[in-house]
Amino acid sequence: MRTIMVMFDTLTRKYLPNYGNDWIHAPNFRRLQKNCTQFNNFYSGSLPCMPARRELHTGKYNFLHRSWGPLEPFDRSSFEILSQNGIYTHLITDHSHYWEDGGATYHNRYSSWEGFRGQEGDRYVARDACAVLPEKTHPLNKQGISVVQHYRNRTRQQTQEQMSSVKTFAAGLEFLDEHKDLDNWFVQIEAFDPHEPFYVPQKFRKMYGLPKEETLFWPRYGSLPEEYKKDMDHCRKEYAALISMCDESLGKVLDFMDENDMWKDTALIVNTDHGFLLGEHEYLGKNFPPCYDELVHLPFFLHIPKLAEGGECDQLFSTVDIAPTLLDLYGIDLSLLMETDGKSIKAVLENKEAPKDHVLFGMHGSYTCWTDGRYVYMKAEKSEDAKAYEYTMMPTNIRGFFSKEQMREAEIVNPGRYSNHIPVMKMPSKAFSLACKFGDQLFDLAEDPEQENNLASAGCREFNEKMKLALKEAGAPEEEYVRIGLN
């Protein structure tokens, strides 16, 4: 068995033709329908970037116990397990969070890895000199040190071939060429695109009639002011142009598989970590608003020779299901992951496992969410001073360490299945959340796919019971029930 995973960051399903979009140019995503099964009820688990990747490794929900952080010493990584069982694993990525404090343990779990610099605010090119920013920028564009860094990084990314995601795919094709006649390998070709900023060559911008000068191409996270709603058409086109560049890169992988007759003996996964709000529900970005469909209901495509080779699947799956699926593809004992929240997609498609009847998703210290594929229930913390806690052996944030105040309050506890029954530090979280200001949210996607009618005011007793059962099954800490009012 050989497996190719093509992973994008911030790929919103409603912007793909496979899921009904009729204006974005993405013929290669459409082309996936020829050889891959399209999943219509695939959800994220933990938001945002690195919490999702931790689930990719462990098959366990991250958000109930931990915010953004590294892979922990007690975690079992699916990729490391593959390597330990004779499968060569290789990561190729331009996702700079892998080399920051809050992500620096992930890439070392692979047999080998290759990285490309320069995305977003990656501390790459020295920015203390010659940092030239545009004289004018849209009022809703992000500001700050990451923007200064981005413009310095751009000095080394003036052509499409110099762009880090393009380099990532080129290295991926090189790996495929070297391994096309070999067996027992896994490669993860992971692009940071189409994550913001939507920096893209002009040829893709021309597809959407965009001017040479960038408009709203790096939307800051938060609410969308009424006076700027008129500008969202440009912003969506900026995002669309970057999706089209991603589509071109994806097409090169599909071409290679066609030319080398790889569909008969090679699995393909095309996935993402989360989506993005571009004015939907009057918000931009992620993290702050409720976990709306655009953020958590993900595109997912899977090819398994003689099993998943086309059509659509409406069964419920989540990011936590990818790790056990990878082990199952190679016939490796799933118990090596220990107590997971995931199921093997392969086993479900083979009718060896019952389909899931619910999944959880959310963001640490913010919304805790449940769905059965029809109803989506989001529980907010009950007050601004509701407490969340970090369970960790590695007290790091995206950049930097936990505060001394947090660490002074640390105690040693055993959180059970989450840490594979190994004691860890428990300390107060500094998770930011506005969930209590929005309140609980309940939507019926069958009747209200745009999530415009919050049903929570009509009563949620039935869904509270479903949520409590799901949290118990996932080994949620006791304070989580208190935080969201289910104690």
Image: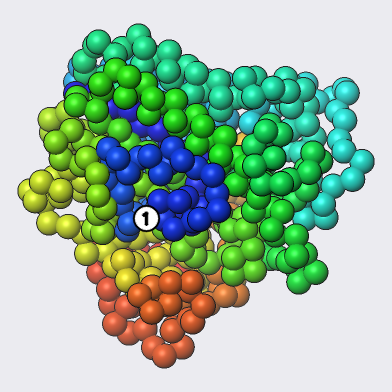
* Residue furthest out toward the left: 352
Screen quadrant of the N terminus: top left
Image quarter in which the C terminus is found: bottom left
Amino acid residing under circle 1: Tyr
Q: Which residue is nearer to you in this view: 341 or 416? A: 341
Q: Report crowding for label 1: few under 14, some 14 to 19, many 20 or more residues within 10 A (C-alpha).
A: many
Q: Is residue 330 left or right of residue 12?
A: left
36 versus 227 height, above or below: above
Q: Secondary structure at mark 1?
A: strand
Front position in the image: 389 or 41 = 41
**Image spot of residue 366 (x, y percent):** 51, 63
Residue at the spot x=44%, y=25% of the render?
252
Q: Position of residue 432 (x, y in %)?
A: 60, 59
Say whether residue 42 is left or right of residue 227.
left
Residue at position x 69%, y 40% in the image: 206
Q: Nearer the viewer, residue 15 or 323?
A: 15
Image coordinates of residue 78 in percent, x first then y, are 28, 32
Number of numbered tags placed on the structure image = 1
Q: Is residue 42 left or right of residue 132?
A: left
Residue at figure coordinates x 31%, y 52% from the top left: 39
Q: Which residue is mark 1?
A: 43
Residue furthest bottom as drawn: 458
Can residue 336 be seen? Answer: no
Q: Quadrant of residue 422?
A: top left
Vertically, is 260 above or below 400? above
- Residue at point 49% right, 23% down? 169
Measuring from the top left, give residue 285's x and y in whole percent.
Answer: 62, 55
Q: Is residue 167 visible?
A: yes
Q: How is the image coloured?
A: rainbow
Corner quadrant of residue 230: bottom right
